[in-house]
Amino acid sequence: MSKNNSLAKSIQKLIEAILSALGYKNTKKRTWHQHVVPYQEGWAVRREGNKRITSKHRKQSTAINKAKVLAKRYKADVIIHRESGGIRDRVSYREND
């Protein structure tokens, strides 16, 4: 099994080197931004880019508080959605660059 893992890692590094040489760069970095979204009969907190939810809540205010705790911990943003799905507000906990 370890031979397969090392072979797979070698192939992955080779592909990354080829793509880098061709000018392709993986600039999309995963963030810790937390989205408060409508979910079933209530609200959910979901990390940006995730399909699965982090937590579900009956009230939007509770979901917002949970999202703020996570965003503060990871110096990220909270994106609050309306029931229709549109963005209502954004709160940033990032340090000034």
Image (cartoon, rainbow, N blue to C red):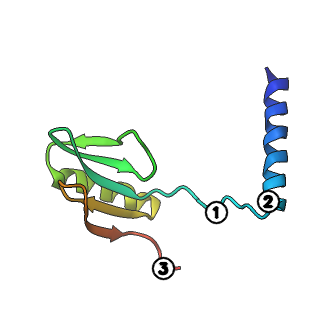
Disc nearest the viewer among 1 and 3: 1
Q: Which structural element holds mark 3?
A: loop
- Whichever of labels 2 and 1 marks the residue nearer the N terminus, that label is 2
Report the side of 17 relative to 90 (left or right): right
Residue for point 26% across, 51% down: 37
**Residue situated furthest top in the rendering:** 1
Q: Which residue is mark 3?
A: 96
Which quadrant would residue 91 be assigned to in this image?
Answer: bottom left
Q: Residues within 10 Å of mark 1 (few under 14, many from 20)?
A: few
Mark 3 residue type: Asn
How many other residues sit within 10 Å of disc 2, few (<14), some (14-19) or many (≥20)?
Answer: few
Q: Position of residue 62 (x, y in %)?
A: 19, 51
- Which residue sits furthest front? 22
Rendered position, 96 above or below 81? below
In the image, which is nearer the foreground, mark 3 or mark 2?
2
What residue sits right under mark 2 in the picture?
20
- What element does badge 1 sit on? loop
Pointer 1 residue: 27
Q: Amino acid at mark 2?
A: Ser
Q: Residue 89: x and y, percent? A: 26, 68
Residue drawn at the location 47% of the way across and 74% of the way down: 95
Instruction: Tell me residue 26's x, y (percent).
Output: 67, 58
Picture quarter containing residue 33?
A: bottom left
Under mark 1, the amino acid is Thr
As measured in the structure, the alpha-carbon distance from the residue carrying label 1 to the one carrying label 3 is 21 Å
